[in-house]
Amino acid sequence: MFFEKAKPIWLKDLSCEMNIQAGFKTEIFAEKGKKYSINIADSCLYRLFVNGEFVCYGPARAGHGYARVDEIDITEKITEGKNTIAIEAAGYNCLSFYLIKRTSFVTAEVFCNGKAVASTGYDFAGVRLSQKVQKINRFSFQRPFGDVWELDINSDMYFWTTRDVPTMETEVIQEEIKYLSRRAKMPEFNISPCNSYLEKGTLEVAPELDDYIKTRANFWDDVYKDFSTFPQKDIVNSPIKDYCLRKPVKEKDLSGKGQIVISEGEYIILDMSRNYTGFVKTLFTANKDSRVLIGMDEVLTGGMPDPMRKFQTGQIIGYNVTASDKDYDLESFECYGFRYAMIMVVKGEITFKDFSLREYIYPLHNTPEIHTDDVELKKIYDATIETYRQNVVDIYMDCPTRERAGWLCDSYYTAQMEWFLTGKGDVEHDFIENFMLFSPRDDIPEGMMPKCYPADHGKHNTYIPQWAMWLAFEVDQYLQREKTADKAEYKDFFYKLIRFFEAYENADGLVEKLPSWNFIEWSKANQWTQDVSYPTNMMYSHLLKITGRIYNDKVLVKKGEALAEKVIEKSFDGELFVDNAVYNEEGVLVNTGNRSETCQYYAYAFDVIKGLDDPRFSYLRNAVLNIFGSKREKTGHLPDVEYANAMMGIYIRMELLFKWGKYEKLLDEIKEFFGKMADLTGTLWEHNKVAQSLNHGFASYVGYLIYECLKRL
């Protein structure tokens, strides 16, 4: 039992409003020598303070109708006598890929030696934290809202966690919430300082936003109103617009760190030395009433961080602060991922004193060391560790910046890194459990899974048929790794998923015309998914075979083998596999001739081809081993075959090379493909170029490959 009597509460009449920041406070009187702890469940996000000191941030995410409970030992934070416990919580109430849309609530209970001494619904007062501006732009299409604050350090509300401030009536939320345990470890929150200042300059103000910025930030124009935004006319405080209206003009280089005055119309650029993820900490004195903006990105574009570089993302913090000779010691509520930051003062003047970041990363101990003199390989390996830690704090995420979403397929690879680094699957358990508890919604049909979860997609490409199969492949591996897991718990999932695909089988047994967003990889291969996608059918064949193996269903195994042979018959052109076939005007299914590098990898990865020795595929075997890969664009070989991108082709290729024992070749290709990433950001990327996320969770899998290859050589 997680709670003795605590009830879910929120500020009265505000539980269904968007972007409400709330505080909940209680006092306890502590005795020396006793143990104190607190259990917290939360609808969105919270951070916990004891006597004004930061303790932790959470929770671990769960799906609709559920909430995971953080169980936190606070004994070391408690002093003898009176103690103030404060929980700051966001109630976003909007559709996103990061968090589900639900009625806002916090359930919390403080324990002394295991006995409840303070409970929400009885002992916690509510505080409306209106210093966080409510009506602001979305952080991104995929994430709710960022940090826009109006602060007065001379007000008691600035110190609300420790001082007496006006309270607000709370109400008990009348919803059934099923509480779940959190297996994922609590993250670490180390403070990492800025590495150095890079430059200082002035800001030129443009009369209006250029069309390019408007295109990248089109959520400003309320085009996603069905995806939960405030009308543009109601947004009067927009750091995103203010930032993008200003163009920096460099005046001088900076070096080192230290105190620096930034006047109105000036900026400085900071370098953290590599990508970090966490909560932005700034320390400054406001010499005048000031408006301060902090824009962040993983790289410099045109010499400056471009927080709008990732489509529909605004990594910008806005602070309006009242003048005071006291220091503003600020920390963002939302987490950000970046290497570079630009501090702009668009009004007033500040004396800037310090910049750092409270990391939000998964804890690791006894990280396996690699033994090599290859400096580049070591740098890539270190980058995989950072990539993993920043993308795994409660579930497997795609990236810690734009989305923070629990995507399928990505998770298949990240899971292997978790088991390698920890020897356990704590995060994987919670990740899979969230999907197994999912009930059909958002137009997702019976048997199918959302593309990422926990999330609320509305009607925006809610599922990817291929991604649900990747979940099946991951569960298969999980059952092999986790010896205590009960395969019976997953049987319904496997068979319902197969029934979904059976509805789309044609006379040859091939699935065709699959609905929603079909995904093979980030290349032209993704344009070749209809009417019959052969890579998809390769996956379907594998799904049938592994389900048959897990549940001793010989009929499914036989069906899967027959489908694999049918794919060869229909798709293989004597050299390579064709990606797709379409119906012509006569209603006859005709191969398109489209061929991708990734399609060839699918054929091997999903056992359509049994190993490397089948003489029918000698040309293909040579192409895979000696022509394809990260160097092919330089050699120009087989230019009519679409090049593979990082996701998914290169990762499947790496799996295959490892499986076939091509360890030296694999390490050589890893250095060729990932070396520039480790150099530039210290993390590994979503694509094979500077585009979108430059810190993507599935890429951490490379660390496992490096270690295992070196061990075998």
Image: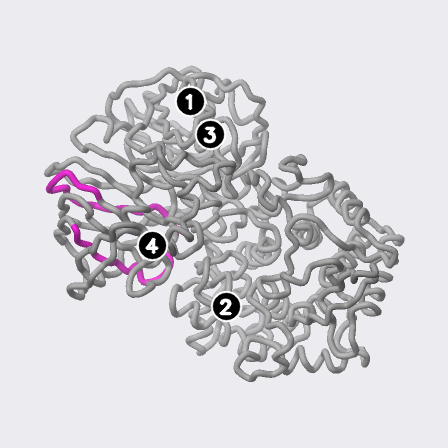
Residue at image mark 1: 14
Residue at image mark 2: 688
Q: Is label 1 in a helix, a strand or a loop? A: loop
Question: Magenta stretch?
Answer: 265-291
Closer to the camera: disc 3 or disc 4? 4
Closer to the camera: disc 3 or disc 2? 2
- Rendered image: mark on residue 210: 4
- Rendered image: mark on residue 39: 3
Q: What scheme was used to colour the molecule? A: one colour
Residue 356 visible in image: no
Task: Say which quarter of the image contains residue 149.
Answer: top left
* Three-letter amino acid code of the residue under disc 3: Asn
| Sequence-wise first label, 3 or 4 | 3
| Sequence-wise first label, 3 or 1 | 1
Q: Quadrant of the C terminus?
A: bottom right
- Residue 231 location, x and y as percent? 40, 34
Distance from label 4 to label 2 (Cα)?
A: 28 Å
Q: Is residue 377 above or below residue 311?
A: below
At horizontal 84% and vertical 69% (from top left) the residue drawn is 569
Q: In this image, 676 relative to 242: left or right?
A: right
Distance from label 3 to label 2 (Cα)?
A: 43 Å
Which residue is nearer to you in this view: 93 or 7? 93
Closer to the camera: disc 3 or disc 1? 1
| Sequence-wise first label, 3 or 2 | 3
* Three-letter amino acid code of the residue under disc 2: Asn
Mark 4 surroundings: few (<14), some (14-19) or many (≥20) residues within 10 A: few
Image marks 1 and 4: residues in contact by CB distance under 8 Å? no
Distance from label 3 to label 1 (Cα)?
A: 23 Å
Task: Say which quarter of the image contains residue 535.
Answer: bottom right
Which residue is nearer to you in this view: 658 or 634? 634
At horizontal 89% and vertical 53% (from top left) the residue drawn is 555
